[in-house]
Image (tube, helix red, strand yellow):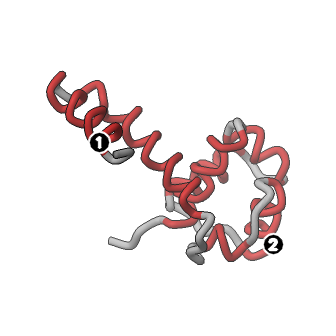
């Protein structure tokens, strides 16, 4: 199974910029369904569309396609935040407390 780096990057940047898939689709000039498929990895956008997505999200094509840079720590934060928000409802109180403790212990 291949990792959908493009979709993850788009999702992270949508959250960072406070945009919806619909708003991004309008800016890029594609349907919301197409954008959803790009993000889920069901469809790969053609080159010009990737350029339009990058421009709309104020980033580079290289960043969207997975070129790692030192500034990726901010994107990693949004990925982690999204994963926590998606899964926290299934965690026990102890697991939640362990996460909070790990965050505070890392500051020492």
Q: Give neighbour class at mark 1: few <14, some 14-19, many 20+ (Cα, 10 Å).
A: few
Give yes or no for contact between labels 2 and 1 (Cβ–Cβ under 8 Å).
Answer: no
Q: Which mark is residue 26?
A: none
- Residue at the spot 31% in from the left edge and 35% down from the top edge: 87
Callout in the foreground (2, 1)? 1
C-alpha span from label 2 to label 1 = 45 Å
Residue 37 horizontal/vertical position (percent): 57, 54
Tag 2, which secondary structure? helix
Quarter of the image containing the N terminus?
bottom left
- Residue at the spot 41% in from the left edge and 68% down from the top edge: 3
Which is more N-terminal, label 1 or label 2?
Answer: 2
Query: Vertical placement of 102 versus 66: above or below?
Result: above
Q: How many marks?
A: 2
Label 1, on which residue? 105
Tag 1, which secondary structure? helix
Query: Vertical placement of 83 versus 59: above or below?
Result: above
- Residue at the spot 75% in from the left edge and 70% down from the top edge: 60
- Residue at the spot 60% in from the left edge and 73% down from the top edge: 69
Residue 99 occupies quadrant: top left
Query: Vertical placement of 11 versus 88: above or below?
Result: below
Q: Is residue 66 left or right of residue 53?
A: left
Residue 106 horizontal/vertical position (percent): 33, 47
Q: Is residue 22 left or right of residue 92?
A: right
Q: Give neighbour class at mark 2: few <14, some 14-19, many 20+ (Cα, 10 Å).
A: few
Q: Nearer the viewer, residue 42 or 57?
A: 57
Q: Is residue 108 left or right of residue 33?
A: left
Residue 41 horizontal/vertical position (percent): 50, 61
Label 2, on which residue? 48
Residue 100 horizontal/vertical position (percent): 30, 32
Q: Nearer the viewer, residue 75 or 19?
A: 75
């Amino acid at each position: 199974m291949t990792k959908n780096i493009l979709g993850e990057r788009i999702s992270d940047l949508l959250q960072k910029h406070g945009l919806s898939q619909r708003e991004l689709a309008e800016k890029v000039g594609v349907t919301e369904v197409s954008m959803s498929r790009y993000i889920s990895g069901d469809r790969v956008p053609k080159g010009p569309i990737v350029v339009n997505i990058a421009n709309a999200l104020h980033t580079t094509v290289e960043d969207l396609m997975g070129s790692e840079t030192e500034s990726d720590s901010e994107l990693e934060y949004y990925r982690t935040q999204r994963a926590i928000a998606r899964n926290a409802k299934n965690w026990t109180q102890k697991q939640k407390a362990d996460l909070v403790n790990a965050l505070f212990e890392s500051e020492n």
